[in-house]
Image (cartoon, rainbow, N blue to C red):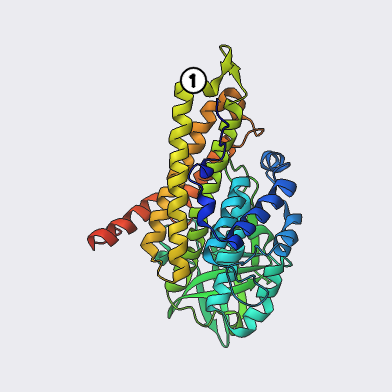
Amino acid sequence: MTTPVTDPLALLDLRSSLSDTERDIQSAVAGFLADRVRPSIGEWFDAGVFPRDLVPELGKLGLLGMHLQGYGCAGTSAVEYGLACLELEAADSGLRSFVSVQGSLSMFSIHRWGSEEQKQEWLPRLAAGEAIGCFGLTEPDHGSDPAGMRTRARRDGTDWILDGTKMWITNGGIADVATVWAQTEDGIRGFLVPRGTPGFTTRDIKNKMSLRASVTSELVLDGVRLPDSARLPLAEGLRGPLSCLSEARFGVLWGAVGAARDSVRSAIEYATTRVQFGRPIAGFQLTQQKIADRAVSVSTSALLALHLGRLKDAGTLRPEQVSLGKLNNVREAIETARVCRTILGGSGITTEYPPLRHAANLESVLTYEGTSEVHTLTIGRALTGISAFEG
């Protein structure tokens, strides 16, 4: 009997492909999560609560908007950000979702498309975890087709009046500021809506079977009056929100690797100690086939994420490449979580073990930031030059 590797990513020694700084950041995030999140995440998932008291700690660790430059942000590389997302989702998709929405949607929308005054007002507080942001694009009737959004912003003198509803908004119920996208007579524009603005209300979505340790909300805008200074001045058309989604999808494709790795780790630990028919179940060929197949899947997904991260750091990453990574890695991760649950048998249906929790969370991850169908058609369009989205 040889010493087990237990970590599927160690099989290919992927850490040898990382710099010292990249390894240090990954280890620091993993250590924080081991101390502050892993002991309680099952309880939070059961109770359907988000650990809001962790937000300032995430800020202190430099995880909020960590890949952005200036304004209190850490200014890390894309790969370093990706490795952090991997470790966050290895703990729970809800925690990685919070960090993604805060940094790659809320903060990125302000950092990329906002005025200097907006950046100074919001980014330092968001980076420190002193404020929480959300991103209002999806609507009850318009998810994959944001161009058809019904939320409207009309001019009233020098002000804007916003009316509409946004749905499935992560962090919505706890956000201090919402980036809201609306149709105007000049096309789609973005607006910053602070909590407490008259006419702006939120309603948390209950009875979720996925992402339970995360806040998901509806945003309602009923005659919300905003000054023109609340408009993101550089955002015109769908390019604004879609650029933010591409940033978030990058974190998603890394995070999925973490959920899959955590599932395989727990399956190996269980299989090497669970005895049936007088021997550990890890000694049976069918169990080893499951573990080996899923380890191969996790390793190839990690290699893909690392390659896309290097492209992003080089400034050459394209949206269809992000779609390829998101489609593959999430699809593989959910299958990995499901297979690993079978190794755990009946024990695997409790929150004492993570695979089924990861599988449930990944059902949401499979859908948000672009469904599998949308990413498939994005890749198909890139390969054929023909769009299949309409008609």
Which amino acid, mark 1? Phe
How packed mark 1 is, by other alpha carbons closer than 10 Å (few <14, some 14-19, many 20 or more), is: few
Quadrant of the drawing holding the C terminus: bottom left
Front position in the image: 84 or 326: 84
Q: Is residue 324 left or right of residue 282?
A: left
Front position in the image: 288 or 60: 288
Task: Choose top left, top right, bottom left or bottom right for residue 207.
Answer: top right
Disc 1 target residue: 284
Q: Residue at 42% of width from left, 60% of height from top?
A: 322
Q: Residue at 61% of width from left, 37% of height from top?
A: 354
Q: Residue 180, image x and y in percent?
A: 55, 69
Q: Is residue 180 above or below residue 53?
A: below
Q: Is residue 322 above or below residue 292?
A: below
Q: Residue at 64% of width from left, 58% of height from top?
A: 24
Front position in the image: 163 or 170: 170
Can the viewer see residue 171 in this picture?
A: no
Q: Is residue 62 above or below residue 121?
A: above
Quadrant of the drawing holding the N terminus: top right
Q: Residue 321, image x and y in percent?
A: 38, 60
Q: Residue 18, image x and y in percent?
A: 53, 58
Task: Choose top left, top right, bottom left or bottom right for residue 384.
Answer: bottom left
Q: Is residue 136 above or below residue 252?
A: below
Can the viewer see residue 206 in this picture?
A: yes
Q: Specify the farthest residue to the front.
A: 2
Q: Specify the farthest residue to the top.
A: 277
Front position in the image: 148 or 305: 305
Q: Secondary structure at mark 1?
A: loop
Task: Choose top left, top right, bottom left or bottom right for residue 289.
Answer: top left
